[in-house]
Amino acid sequence: MLIGGKWVEPASGAWFESVNPFTATPWALVPRGGKEDVDRAVAAAKSAFYDGEWRKLTATARGVLLRRLADIIASEADALAKIETTDNGKLIAEMGGQLKYIPQWFHYFGGLADKIEGRVIPIDKPGVFNFTREEPLGVVAAITPWNSPLLLAAWKLAPALAAGNTIVWKPSEFSSVSALVFGELFERAGFPPGVVNIVTGYGNEVGEPLITHRDVSMVAFTGGDKTGEHVYQLAAKGIKRITLELGGKSANIVFDDADLDDAV
């Protein structure tokens, strides 16, 4: 797992298999993280936010890193798409299309990074200067599902990083491999250690300790509505900011005259 800029083994020493759904056979081993790993990752993200090089960067410099990352993603798009389709079973045409789109997301927010502005607000008290200033929250927990792992991660990571936050990312236990490979690209782009951390594992072992951690300021979650309700309740206990993208999985209607093999 990626914690504090270093690749580390899970504290428990446990791993689990990732299964290729097309062949129904294991093809990778993924670290099984736990609360101790979450604590290490959040501490690394908090340190990077308050004490590290990341905090000293200007908004323009953050944008440069995001655009550099976008170019690296574009150069690795085909390889990442193959990993994703092996991990989640979706068509290479779809995953390839997503990977070619992801760089645009980081380019957009890279350009937006130094355009996050406050306001000067007129009030009825003479001699008083009233203004607002937008500031980053701190450590953001990003929890992503199995179906479009890197695309949905980009939707969370790019704006959070553009605003100056740091990240602890928990990918789905069903499709974690692309996230771990993606983590290498942040170092290549020049992001300081601890800005993006990745902890893999199960929801009750990694997700819940991450959501409830006192040093996590915001939770961004994509997944099912029942799990989202649970995430919302956990985050509410710490009065954390939260975004939820919830839904089911694209129901299909199969009529009597359909070719069942094609439908399956």
Image (tube, helix red, strand yellow):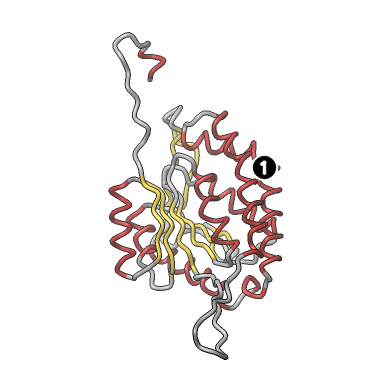
- For image coordinates 66% across by 58% down, the residue present is 187
- The residue indicated by pointer 1 is 76
Point out residue 214 in the picture as x, y percentages from the top left corner: 39, 73
Taking depth in this image into account, of 118 and 179 the one nearest to the observer is 118
Residue 82 sits in which quadrant? top right
Packing grade of label 1 (10 A; few <14, some 14-19, many >=20) is some
Q: Secondary structure at mark 1?
A: loop
Residue type at tag 1: Glu
In which quadrant will I find the C terminus? top left
Q: Is residue 221 above or below residue 124?
A: above
Q: Is residue 44 above or below residue 263?
A: below
Point out residue 191 in the picture as x, y percentages from the top left corner: 65, 62
Name the side, left or right, on which 145 lies relative to 234.
Answer: right
Name the side, left or right, on which 242 lies relative to 150.
Answer: left
Residue 5 sits in which quadrant? bottom right
Point out residue 203 in the picture as x, y percentages from the top left corner: 35, 53
Q: Is residue 122 above or below residue 248?
A: below
- For image coordinates 64% across by 36% down, the residue present is 78
